[in-house]
Image: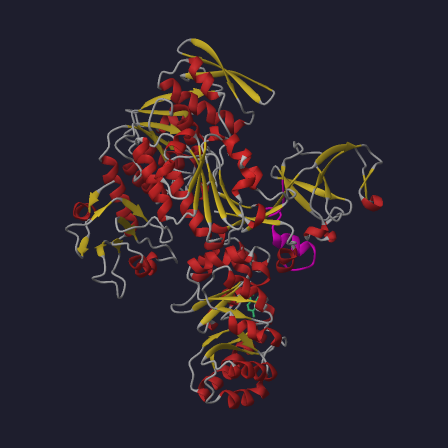
Amino acid sequence: MSIRIQNIVPILKARAFGNTAEAVIDTVSIDSRSLQNSAHTLFFALVGPNNDAHAYIEDLIATGVQNFVVLHIPEGCANKANFLIVENTLDALQQFAAYYRCLFHFLVIGLTGSNGKTIVKEWLNFLLSPDFNVIRSPKSYNSQVGVPLSIFAINEKHNLGIFEAGISTVNEMEKLEKIIQPTIGILTSIGSSHDEGFLDLEEKINEKLVLFKEAEIVIYQKRDLVDKLILPRTKAFTWSFKNAEADVFVYKKETENLNTTVYYKYKGNSHELIIPFQDKASIENAISCLMALLYFNYDSTTIQSRMLLLFPVEMRLKVKNGINNCSLIDDSYSSDFQSLKIALDFLESQKQFPKKTVILSDIFQSGLSNEELYSKVSQLIISNNISRVIGIGETISAFKDTFVNCITFNNTAEFISNFENLDFANETILIKGARSFQFEEIVYLLEEKTHETVLEINLNAISYNLNFFKSKLKPNVKIMVMVKAFGYGNGGLEIAKLLEHHKVDYLGVAFADEGISLKNGGIHLPIMVLNPENTSFSAIIQYQLEPEIYCLKGLYAFLKIAKEKNLYHFPIHIKLDTGMHRLGFEEDTIEELIATLKGNDTVQIRSILSHLATSDDLKHRDFTLSQINLFDTMSSRIVRELGIDPIRHILNTSGISNYPDSQFNMVRLGIGLYGVSNDPAEQKYLENVGTLKSVISQIRTITAGESVGYGRKFMAEKPTKVATIPIGYADGISRGWGNGVGFVSIKDKKAKILGSICMDMLMVDVTEIDCTEGDSVIIFGESPTVSYIAKKLNTIPYEVLTSISQRVKRVFYR
Ligand SMILES: *Cc1c(COP(=O)(O)O)cnc(C)c1O
C-alpha cells in the first residue's frame, strides 16, 4: 500500500492537522506495541470501554510514528505529528478499509456462519492456492476490527480473496459487507453460538445473510429458513444430506479407519469423495469446500487428490517452554506474510528474552516476486530486532544474503541433523513454517519434555477482567494489581508484562524475591512488597522495590539502612491495622510514626493502605464500614500532621464490587483479575483465565466387584470403564476431591473421580463417555470452575489456584 494522507482526509471526513501535504503511508496499525510501526504507518487510536489508545500516542511519536487518526490530539502532542481528527476512530478504520477494498477488482469469497468459518477459510486457501494468488484473513481475524486489518494486506498481485466475517449482534454485518464485498458467499454451519445478540434464529440468519447482499452466488446447507430469507436475485448453490432437491445431494456416508467417504449426486452424476476426518463438523466444513471447488469447475480427480490432504487447523499462537530455558512460539502450520507479521507482533509482546530467533520456511503465495517478498520479510525481521534467522527451504536459502545473521538449510531434515550445533539457549524462538515443511518435528525437538499436564492461561481473558474492574473505578482512581504467589498460581512475569502494557499503576507482591524476579524480567512498573523481611531491605533498595512498612521496628530498621545508603525520598508504603489484625500500625503507634517521619527526607510515604477482613461478606457490612472509617481517620491524621499527599487505598477485589464509595485514590485488584469472583452474580461478567488440562493415559474396563486405586476405596457395582489421568496431589489436586466428590471434564461430559487420588495420577469413570487414550481432560476451567471445586472442598478459590504445583507447566495464549 502506498497512499497519500491527503487522499485519506476526505474519505474519513477528517480535520487534518500537521504537515499532511507530503505524508505517505504504507501500513495501518492499531497496535501500539508493534515494532512494525514506522514513519509510514497510519495509526488508528481505537477507544474501548476502558482502553484508550490515545494514551500511547506520545510514546509512538517518540519511536517515529508520524500519522494518527484520533478523536482529539493528546496533550503535548500537537505539532509533533500529523493528526486526522474524526468523530469515531473505529468507523474511520472501517471507512478506510472499504475505500481500500474498492481499489481492487477480483474474486472474493466471503464466509460467515456460527462455526467453521476459520477452518473452511484455511482449507479453501490450501485447496485453491495451486491456481490462485490468495489473500485471506489471518488467523480468525473476523471482527469489526479484524476484517479491516485483513483487507489492508491486499496487493495488486492477488486474484482471489477469502475473508471471514463474525458478528455477535444486529447491524454489524452491514459494515463488514462494505469492507469485504464478497462475490461468492459461503454460509458455514449455523449453530447456537453467540445467540444472545439475536432475538431468534431468523434474525440471526437474516443478519448473516447481509454479507451476501451483492454476491453472485451463495453456498449453504439447504434449509427452509435460509431459502426463504435469501435475496431473490442471489443465486443459491446448496447441498444437503436429506433433501434431494439440493444442487449437491449427499445420499450416503461411510466411515472407516480415520476417513469418511461421502457419496453425492451433482448434475445428475454420482461421485464419491474420501474426506480424511470422521467428526460431523469436519465433514460439513469439507462439504462447504467441495461446493466451492465444484463452483470453480474442478474435476472430481483433482478435488479428491487435494481434499485427501486436508489437515486440522490450529487457530492460536501457543507459547511453550523450550529446552535450555528457551521460550517457544509455535506457529508451525502457516507461512504467509500476513501471519508472519502477526506472529512477530506476538513475539514482541511476549518480551521474554532480549535474544530472539525466527525459524522460517519458504513463504508461499505472497502475490509478490521472490525478490520483493524476501526483501520485505527481511525488513520486517530487522524492525522486530530479531537476533538470528534460521531459514529452511530452497527458496529462502537462495535469498540468505537478504538477511542479517542468517543460517539456512535446504530442508527440515538438514536442520535436524545440525540441531546440536545451533546452541539454542535463553532465547525466544518463533517457529513458523508452511505445512509441507513439517515444522512440528522442530517444535518437538525444542520443546521441554514434560508430562502432559498443563495450566493454560488465557491472556485475553486477563485483559478482559482487568477492564471489567477498571470500568468500576471513578475517574483518576489508580489500580494496583496483586501478582503475589506467582500471579495467584497463574504465572508472574507473563502476567506482569501484560499489566505493564495496560498501564496499571502498581504491582503488588508478597516477598522481595518475587519483586526481584519481575524486575530482572524487565518490568518497569513500581512494585510494592507487602511482606518485606528486614533481611531483604538491602535488596529492596538495590532493585528499586517499594516496601510496605507495617510497624515501628520495621520502620526503624529500614530508616537505618536507608540513611547509610544516603537515600533521598525513597518510596515506602505505610500499612495500618484497622481490624484485620494481621500486619499494620495500630492506632496507638501513629503518634510515634508521625514523630519519626516528621522532617525526614530519607524516605517518602508514597501511599497509606489498610486491608479489609471481610469485604466479600455483606453480613459483616457494619464491621467493614468501621474499618473504612478508621482507615480514613488514621490516614487523614498522618496526611495532615506530616503535610503530605500520598495515595490512599483499602479495597481488594470484593471491596471494589461492594464498597464503590471507598476507592480513595487507588484499589488493589487480586483474584478478580484471574477470573474468580466471590459473588456468583459478578462471576457471570468475568472470563475464565486458567484451564488445567491433562490427557487420558490408559483406559480399561473392570467388572462388578473389582476395585480401583489405593485402599480399594472404589468398588465397582457394574462393569465400569476407567480412565487414568497423569495428575495427582503432588500437582496440587486435593485428596479431598477424590472418592466420588469431584469430577473432571472429558468431551464436555463429567467424569467422576474413582477412589483415592494418587500422588501423580487419578482415575475417573468414563463408562458413559465416548473417549480414547490420549484424549484431552479438563481438571478445572469452564467446568468444573475453580469456585465450584473450592466450595466442595470447604475452602476458597485462592487456595485451589495457588496450590497448583510449579511442576505443572504454564502455557500462555491469546
Ligand atoms: C492479596 C491482597 C489483595 C488482593 O485481594 P483479592 O481478594 O485477591 O482481590 C489486596 N491487598 C492485600 C494487602 C493483599 O494481601
Question: Is 735 on the left or on the right of 525, as rendered?
Answer: right
Question: Is 736 on the left or on the right of 425, as rendered?
Answer: right
Please state the horizontal and vertical placement of residue 602, each as a whole percent of the image. Answer: 48, 83
Please state the horizontal and vertical placement of residue 631, each as a whole percent of the image. Answer: 52, 79
In the depicted structure, whether residue 125 falls above or below residue 317: above
Please state the horizontal and vertical placement of residue 239, each as a whole percent of the image. Answer: 43, 20
Looking at the picture, tell me which residue is in the foreground, 363 or 690.
363
Please state the horizontal and vertical placement of residue 743, each as a whole percent of the image. Answer: 68, 45
Looking at the picture, tell me which residue is in the foreground, 622 or 333.
333
- Which residue: 49% across, 80% down? 632
Magenta region, residue range: 777-796
- Which residue: 48% across, 56% down? 465
Q: Is residue 238 among what the camera can see?
A: no
Q: For residue 122, what is the image quadrant?
A: top left
The quadrant of the rendered image in which ligand 1 is seen is bottom right
In the depicted structure, whether residue 537 falls above or below residue 811: below
In the depicted structure, whether residue 240 falls above or below residue 469: above
